[in-house]
Image (cartoon, coloured by chain):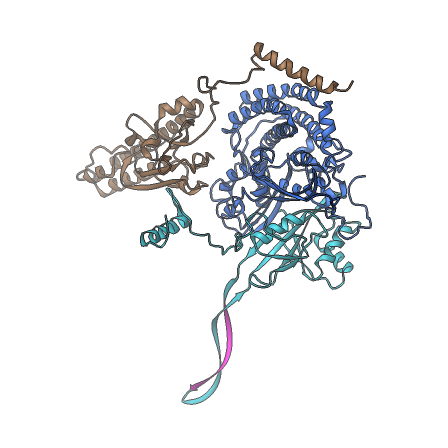
Chain colours: A brown, B blue, C cyan
Amino acid sequence: MLGDGILKGLAETAKNFAGSFVSKERMTTVEYPEERLPLPEASRNFPFLVYDGDDWEKGLRCVACQICEKECPPKCIYIEKSKDKKPDYVGKPQIYPAKFDIDISVCMSCQICVEVCPFEAIKMNTEFELATDDRFGGLLLDRKELARSNEYYHQIHPTEASEVDARLAEEKSKVEAKARAAAQAAAAKAAATPTTAIPSTPLPGKPAANVDARPASTAKTAEDNKNAETRATNEGEPKA
Amino acid sequence: MSSSGIKTERLAGWNRPPVIESDGEGELLEVAMGPHHPSTHGVFRMDVVLDGERVIKLKPVFGYLHRNHEQLGQSQSYLANMPYTDRLDYFCSLTNNWAYALAVEKLAGQEVPERAEYLRVILAELTRVQNHASTIGFLLQEMGASGTPLMYAFREREKILDLFESLTGSRMMCNYMRFGGCRVDASPAWLDATRKVVDGLPAFIDEFERFLMTNEILIARCQGIGVLRPDLAVNAGISGPMLRASGVNYDIRKVDHYGIYDRFKFRVPLGDHGDIYDRYMVRMLEMRESISILKQALKELPTGPVMDPKAKIRNFRPKPGEVYGRIEAPKGELGFYLISDGSPNPYRYRIRPPSFINLTVLEDMCLGSNVADVVLIFGSVDIVLGEVDR
Amino acid sequence: MKSVEEIKSAIEAAVPGATVSVVPNPAPTAQHSLLIGAERAIQIAEFLRDDGELALDFLSNVTGVDWLDKEISEKVKVTRQVPKSVDGVEQIVEETVEETRKRVELGYLEAVYHLYSVAKKHGPVVVRLRTANRTDQVELPSLTPIWRSAEFQEREIFDLFGIVFTGHPDLRRILMWDEFKDHPMRRDYVEPDDFEYEPTPHDEVLKRAQEHKAKVAAGEAIQ
């Protein structure tokens, strides 16, 4: 009969229409913004900077190595290094970014900055409701707006965050173990040589000022301590 | 009558579009269809000269989406080009990624672990399914079905895009392949979700077919319209479903043996007439073949790393040389031609876009038919402006 | 499929007067190419397409490449006859001096064709055509009469590189607008100065943004 195919098609449509009142599968519309679909864990939108602890300035993981700036395809990151240093998660003094701007109108969410960061400092956020009416500068996020705590990171990407935390804790324990071993070796050496008058060997992480401030240390121990610290720092920096 | 290896006496100009004379009554009307047009799949213009309803001449005009992708590619490193390849054929970002990764891996002699190859095949076939479904949906939208088949196709497409989002992080701009494998591994939870989606796909295609295949309006509007001869198709560099609908058996997955496609059993659907209906049917059948490949790949997926440990992410400098690597993207043959001179940036970065070249014969197919058919023929070529203009 | 050398001999046998040479490709893919002269290019192309064994009926890709002029400075040992006084006597002595000579190796524009065979399912065969220089002698024969797929791609190369393909049925700009001047993909192309707002400029863009700002301050350009 002519029109058979059209009737079959109409039957399909009718089934879907009637079915949408009954089965969840056929009713696929989500009434945004009243209802929101939960985003999958891996979803990514724009980057943010992670900080440990409560103070975002002190705990910022970024050390302004500028690797993400170099690898960013549309060159939307702008970093200026600071002049002074602050201690990082293993205690070693590192420079930090005085300015860290991301222009999210240019950023294409490719995640390459996250892949190449050696310090687990920049991760992908999932916020997407970022519309603004300020055309020049409204979408230029600076350091303060980009910083989010580690707890927030755990909230949006729980598995990833736990992995990162495990890795950082492992690195930290390795650094401490190496430093302890080096310090013990230095102490053993110092006990063996007769002409020493050393006070307690310094723990790693104490800033360089301490080494200078310690009185009456022999050149040998000072050198050993310096070696211990350099060895510690070589271990402490994750592979770039 | 298949490919053109047979020597024929070719008259000079046999592969030029025919010259159609108007019947002399009335004036010729010059219309610019586009670039603001709901049916031109993006910003695309066709300058048609009409005699009444019949098309006398047709010239495609594009370049409205030209973003100088090739010049950008030459000014940044190989890795930084990977997110830009997502934005070429923005429906099928994972196949674009694979084509580029394949070309660079050939250039550098980089190996890819097995699990990564399987994941690449799985994602590429999922991309093919959702691309063909959308194409058929859009074709029917242009026929006047006001979006209902399109929304059915998009319902399935949403499921596949959700899979992409949970694996790669983004629904469309996936940026997932790297030189030497894939960026992250697929968890068992993701594989289960994929299996569920793949198991639901045959039902969707059956429903789609029931909906459309015997529809009289579809048959009347598509059969015999926009016929493309196989010898002209081969000579004009047409590739993909359009070539196979004309009866030419050329699927790059079977010809080039790239990746691990040799391990999967799948058939290549061919058409007889080369009209719009054949292209629609070839796409339907290819969706079914993709599902069979997906089932095989998901069953045989091995364990192991997804990234070659010797692969470099930063400071990647392939040795000087050049390469042309191509894959069977859903739209046709997507190739990348790279010349390296030892520096971190490519010296020449060229994309061989299937949509751009498939448009060569648009005039040939449309001459003599009505304006309404022009829209349908254009929809059956299946272009994406991001690829045409780069 | 035949190797590159065999194809070269086949072309030389079939098309008299053809200039063919092999350009080796050091990459692992070993896709060596054939550099053919422009005079017999159309006959060579017809031979490649119609030959029974090669049957390269599918032109997959046409690429344009820009090779800039190279300034080469070489150290050359020059032997000269110089008058010198040896032991108080004026004599003509031969002296070998090292000189640095600079010369300019002319760059060229190149069109690279990738050919496949649908009938025999082999390929690719890479064919190159080079212009004489980059400035005035930029014509090449168009292979569109042989393979239709070159039509749009040669138009694109004309648009972006400036190679004029003689014999092309419809040579005009395809991606840029018709009134555009210059050829954007050339290596020495300089973009016009049209910065509006550049919040995170880097490298070259930074330099040009600063120059642009200076110009705006001096009143020579509008923001």
Q: Quadrant of the C terminus of chain B?
A: top right
* Magenta stretch in the rendered image: C74-85
Numbered marks: total = 0
Figure quadrant of residue B196? top right
Q: Quadrant of the N terminus of chain B?
A: top right
Q: In this orientation, does residue B211 appear?
A: yes
Residue lying at the far front of the rendered structure: B26
Q: Is B93 left, or right, of C50 in this rendering?
A: left
Front residue of A120 and C183: C183
Residue B51 lies, in percent from the top left, at 70, 42
Q: Is residue B390 above or below residue A26?
A: below
Query: Who's the residue at 27% across and 32% down the image?
Result: A203
Q: Is residue B377 above or below residue C110?
A: above
Figure quadrant of residue C165? bottom right
Front residue of C220 and B89: C220
As for residue C76 lying within the magenta part, the answer is yes
Residue B42 lies, in percent from the top left, at 57, 36
Residue B297 lies, in percent from the top left, at 64, 26
